[in-house]
Image (cartoon, grey):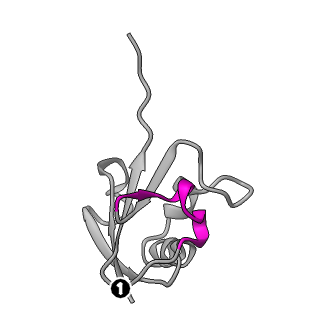
Amino acid sequence: MAVTVRIPTTMRPISGGNSTVEVEGATLREVLAALDAAYNGFKDRLFDDAGDLHKFVNIFVSDDDVRYLQGLDTPVKSGDTVSIIPAVAGGF
């Protein structure tokens, strides 16, 4: 099943400059593994040493935050869009 992954600007050098890529997978975990297999370097940017998503990376499957779904085990289907959104912090 082909899933579109939206790549944030800060990570586009890893994807060869592509803003979107298509990979296969039935769960978010499989999609992210396929993304790293196709474009080495995503794993280091997305996961901590324990294999969990970094706190400062938000991932959405079809506009739903995976932290409120099933996390890395969130199912994806052909045609879904996975968006990687780096957290933004700031202040006055």
Query: Does 88 sit above or below residue 20?
Result: above
Please state which of residues 69 and 17 is positioned toward the viewer in this rendering: 69
Is 52 situated left or right of 82 in this image?
right
Kindly indicate the quadrant of the structure image that contains residue 16.
Answer: bottom left
Badge 1 density bin: few <14, some 14–19, many ≥20, Cα 10 Å: few
> Residue 44: x, y in percent?
57, 57
Count of numbered circles on the image: 1
Kindly indicate the quadrant of the structure image that contains residue 39.
Answer: bottom left
Q: Residue furthest bottom?
A: 1
Residue in the picture at 40% in, 83% down: 77
Give the residue type that dot 1 points to: Ser
> Residue 25: x, y in percent?
48, 83
Please state which of residues 12 and 72 is positioned toward the viewer in this rendering: 72
Residue in the picture at 26% in, 61% down: 17
From the image, which quarter does the C terminus lie in?
top left
Residue in the picture at 41% in, 22% down: 90
Identify the secondary structure beneath mark 1. loop
Query: Does 21 sit above or below residue 84?
Result: below
From the image, which quarter does the N terminus lie in?
bottom left
Please state which of residues 9 and 14 is positioned toward the viewer in this rendering: 9
10 in the magenta segment: no
Tell me where the magenta segment starts and ends, as one range. Answer: 63-74
> Residue 70: x, y in percent?
59, 65
Q: Residue furthest top?
A: 92
Query: Does 30 sit above or below residue 86?
Result: below
> Residue 19: x, y in percent?
25, 62
User: Which residue corresponds to mark 1?
Assistant: 78
73 in the magenta segment: yes
Residue in the picture at 35% in, 66% down: 62
